[in-house]
Amino acid sequence: MKKILSIALCMFMVFGLAGCGGDKHPNDEADTTSKTETENSVTEQEMSAPKEMPSETEHPTDGSGKILVVYYSASGNTKAVAEIVAEAAGADLFELTPTEIYTSEDLDWTDEDSRVSREHSDESLRDIPLTETMVANWEEYDTVLIGYPIWWGIAAWPVDGFISANDFTGKTVIPFCTSASSGFGESGELLEETAGTGTWLEGKRFSSRPSEEDVRSWVDGLAL
């Protein structure tokens, strides 16, 4: 009888220990799985996190800050002023040239049958073709100064073709003109309306033959 009880007690102890060992493994696996999931989660977050991008200040706009002086000159007066403006501003020059050059007879506004007189009377004649309207590397210029003579209180119409052909978005535009007696008038405002884009500043009227000092003083005041 004692022998039977001893055998039964031994068997009970063996099964008891086996049961304890069986409860431990799932818990270890759960702990291991939890740890693995945590590590994987961190790794995925690190991999999916966006890379730090440079700030906008490290990447300025594509414009290089260059300055361009565009001009049309019928008799040479505006050309002389434009050259001084370009030199004082450190700017490039671009001359507007009609495919059909105006002669001195064409420019005789006192003659009702002269070319400019006919064009003044009939606006449909003012669409003057130019030899070139597109400026190389136009997108590099942040500031554009546009010079022209005054014809009947407005900008000489050969300038209109250039204004219409170009996009002034993002550019600062500064008009200037030459005139023997007429004022600046609405010439700048009308060109701005034609352009439809750009930031247009107040223009400047010069006499037909201003002094170099006056021209340079104006340019210096622009703080370009």
Image (cartoon, rainbow, N blue to C red):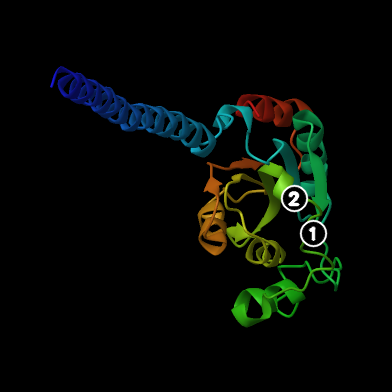
Asked if residue 211 lies left or right of residue 18, the reply is: right
Which residue lies under the disc numbered 1? 96
Task: Please say if 221 is above or below 136.
Answer: above
Q: Marks 2 and 1, how far apart in space?
A: 7 Å
Asked if residue 121 lies left or right of residue 7, the reply is: right
Quarter of the image containing the N terminus?
A: top left
Q: Give the image location of residue 109, x and y in percent.
A: 71, 68
Q: Amino acid at mark 2?
A: Val
Q: Residue at x 74, y 36 (%)?
A: 210
**Extreme-front residue of the structure:** 1
Secondary structure under the numbered disc 2 in the rendered image: strand
Asked if residue 56 lies left or right of residue 14, the reply is: right
> Label 1: few (<14), some or many (≥20) within 10 Å?
many
Task: Please say if 157 is above or below 93.
Answer: below
- Residue 222, quarter of picture: top right
Residue 27 or 74: which is nearer the viewer? Answer: 27
Secondary structure under the numbered disc 1 in the rendered image: loop
Which residue lies under the disc numbered 2? 70
Residue 6 can be seen in this image: yes
Task: Please say if 28 is above or below 146.
Answer: above
Q: Give the image location of residue 169, x and y in percent.
A: 57, 52
Mark 2–mark 1 contact, CB under 8 Å?
yes
Residue 128 or 89: which is nearer the viewer? Answer: 89
Q: Residue at x 60, y 78 (%)?
A: 123
Residue 49 can be seen in this image: no
Q: Give the image location of residue 45, x and y in percent.
A: 46, 34
Q: Amino acid at mark 1?
A: Leu
